[in-house]
Each structure stands twice: as C-alpha cells, then as structure tokens.
Image (cartoon, rainbow, N blue to C red):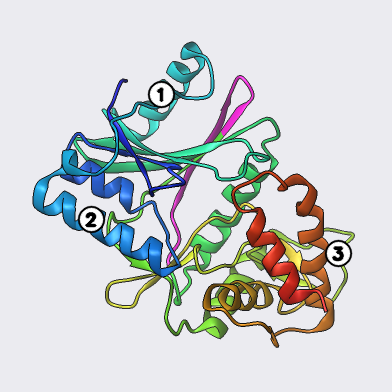
Amino acid sequence: MTEQYRAFPPGRGHLKIPVSSRRAARAGLAMYAPCRPKGVLARWVAWRIVGVLGAGALPGHPTTWKPPMSEAMWAALVTEWADVAGRFDGVAVHERLQASRSGFAVMLLKEGDPLAFVKVREGDGTSIDNEFRALGAVANHEPGAFVVPRPVTTGEVGGWHYLMTSSLAPELHRMPVHPPLGRVLEDVRNGLSSLGRPTDTPAHWEPMHGDFTPWNLRECRGGSLFLIDWEDAGWAPPGADEVLYRAVEAMLTGKHRVDAGSREARTFWVERLRGRQVATADDQDAGVVEALLGLLDD
C-alpha cells in the first residue's frame, strides 16, 4: 500500500495526511487536536485549502510513510485489520511525538471514508489491553456527558499490539470552551468503577481517565463532547483528573497558578510527571512536562 502524504502540522509533522482525495485528507486532519492558536489556525487553513483547491494543494513536499516494522509483519497486520473492518485502500497516520514511547496510530480509509481507528504499540501490550477494557466499560455505561469510540478488537503480530476502535466523524473539533467537568468526570468514575478496584489501591481512591486533557476531551460543532485515549485509566486520589485538566488548561492560557485539587491529588501528578522527566528528556513534548511540574510542584 503506497500512498502520497503531506507531513502536518508544519514543524512537527507527526501526522501524515493522505492526498488521494479531499475526504481522505480531511479524515487525516481530523486526527489533529490542536489547543494553541497557532495550531488551530494551521488546521483551519489546511481544511479550507483541501475544500477549495483539493488535497494536492496542501503545502509541503510530497512524502511517503514506511511502517516501523518488516513488510511481512505490516502485511500481516493489514490482513488482520481488513478481516475485521473490511478492505481498506489507504491510511492516515498519527506518529507519537514522544521518542521514548514507541508506536503509532492509523485511520483505515476506504475511498477516503474512515472505517476504523487502530492504535499500535510495540512490546508490552498492557496499555492496549487496559484501554480496551476501559472503553468497553465506559461504553456499556452509556455516558450522557460525552461519547467514546466503540472498542472493536485487540490483537498482536510479532510483538506489535493493537487496539481497533470505531472511528469518530472526520470533522473539526476544538478544545472545549466551558466543559461541564463535573458531569464528565462523574461519567468517567461511574463507567470505570465496573472494572473493579485493584487490591493494593487505597480505599478512598477513585477511578480516573489518567490523561484527562483538552487534547483528549474535544468539543464538536453543536457542543457535543468526545473523550479519547484511555490507555492510562486507573485509580487515583479524588480529583486527580480535574487537577491535570486544570494544570494543562493553565499552561495553555498562560496562567501561573493552579488552585484545583487536594494536596494528595497534586502530589500524585508531581510524582508521575517526575517519573516521566527522565524518559521524556529528548521528546518533543518535554517542555509540557516541565511546565506542568512548574504549576503543580509547590
């Protein structure tokens, strides 16, 4: 499967946008979740260019994408995915910004229309299994405050583990303006509570999403919300999800203080972020970890 792409956004280029058709290009652009004005503007301009001039008019040099595995292994993955989602003729690609964390994600496309979303991780499949269970539990709960992708299947080929979910609509979405965090987080807790509490978990801890940020909670046209990336779902001090959300929100809006959450919840995130400091030293998002520590470590 050979396809021409444009790397997006400018500078980072971790998305590979197919230029085979307008629909395919917009499906790829919809995988981008910008929160800063520069990224929001870049995506809007690209969206308009595709709509008016076609996918081939996207700026940048044409490029290809090579999966980070052998051709035989990639072919085996493609066969497994097609058996479940149906035959597809293209993919849009999302590469991870963290060099310390291997893996990628693809949107499976048929004539430019999304068939399914597949997240791929190398080595330990724990996070894949965790997200599959979390998505299933939350979907069965039928949350009223947001929607989640429907978990379809998991699998493994040669040490590469994958999670397939339904695809969300290929449309523009944004960082929520005034999200009802209370209702959203209540649905998160209620949905995940069915997974059961691990034996070593403090009795007062609650279920958490684990990566509850404005780039994972997104607002669509009309105000509806969706919540993605559940691989870090687990248990934490009460209010931990909101503490992380408020810290990221403060970082994005230039605030210098975060007042939300208990000391225990803030300490929980400081310890987690310090653990990531060494691993992310050379990652493109290392500055995010440093900024969040500056806001939470008092």
- Can you say which quadrant of the picture contains the C terminus? bottom right
Secondary structure at badge 3 equals loop
User: Within the magenta stretch, is there residue 155?
Assistant: yes
Q: Percent from the top left, x then y, of residue 30?
A: 33, 54
Task: Single out the mark in the foreground, 3 or 2.
Answer: 2
Q: Percent from the top left, x then y, of residue 142?
A: 47, 68
- Residue 78's tag is 1
Q: Quadrant of residue 186?
A: bottom right
Secondary structure at badge 1 equals helix
The local crowd at label 1, few if under 14, some if 14 to 19, many if 20 or more residues have their Cα within 10 Å, is some
Q: Quadrant of residue 274?
A: bottom right
Q: CA distance from mark 2 to mark 1?
A: 28 Å
Residue at the far bottom: name it. 259
Specify the amino acid type for callout 2.
Trp
Horizontally, residue 155 falls left or right of residue 225, namely right
Horizontally, residue 65 falls left or right of residue 244, namely left
Residue that appears at 66% across and 72% down: 244
Secondary structure at badge 2 equals helix
